Each structure stands twice: as C-alpha cells, then as structure tokens.
Amino acid sequence: MEEIDLIVTKQLTNRPNDRTDIRFLQDKIEAAYRDRLRTCSAEEAQEMLARFATPEIAAFAVKEASDADVRSLGWKLLDEMRQAGDPFAEDLIREIEPHNRGIKP
C-alpha cells in the first residue's frame, strides 16, 4: 500500500495516534513529490496532483518545476485553493507572485 492510500485510511478518525501518522505520511509524500515535480512531465504532474495536493506542494511546483506546464498547473491549483478559501494558498500566492511575473494563476 502506498503512503497516499494509507493516509486516506487515517484521515477523519480523530484518533491522536492517527494524527501523528498522518503528519509522518504527509511529510513522506511531500518529499517524494518535491523530488518528482522538479523534472516530471505535465502529464505526470497532473496525475500526481490529482491524488494529493497541498498549497505548499502547488507552490513548490510553481517555484521549482523545470517544465512551464507544471509551473502553470501549480498556479492553477493555488488559485483554486485560494478561491475555495484556503488562507495558506492566499499567503503563498502573495509570497511567490512577485518572483513569477510571467505565470499568473
């Protein structure tokens, strides 16, 4: 079972030990995503981010991906999260926007 599949079984249980497990699994998933998002294709990034996305991972894609389509996908996800009311996405957009003038959400 992959970390992404396992994290789903832990979410919404409200058990204290599951919260610790979720954080551990999320850290592992995010590390793996950071490794792949730097160089993956837009198609692979789309598949990955459809399974698991956080504002931090979307911002990482914007800042670090070598593929322009992956960076654009990161902006799109951040903007969707912001429109859904995610304050972390809003903060990250404000933080990275001045450095990425060529790509807008």
Image: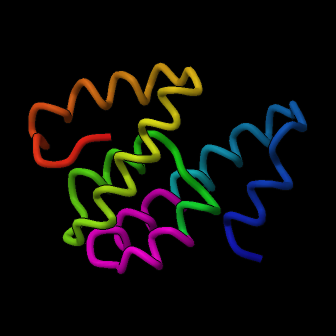
In this rendering, the count of numbered labels is 0
* Figure check: 103 above or below 47: above
For residue 83, side relative to residue 12 (left or right): left
* Figure check: 43 above or below 21: below
* Figure check: 10 above or below 67: above
* Residue span colored magenta: 29-47
Q: Nearer the viewer, residue 57 or 28?
A: 57
Report the residue at 38% width, 74% height from top.
42
Report the residue at 21% width, 51% height from top.
63
Q: Position of residue 90 (x, y in %)?
A: 39, 23
For residue 58, side relative to residue 68 (left or right): right
Magenta segment's dominant SS is helix
Q: Position of residue 9 (x, y in %)?
A: 86, 55
For residue 29, side relative to residue 13 (left or right): left
Report the residue at 46% width, 46% height from top.
77
Q: Nearer the viewer, residue 50 or 12?
A: 50
Q: Position of residue 97 (x, y in %)?
A: 19, 33
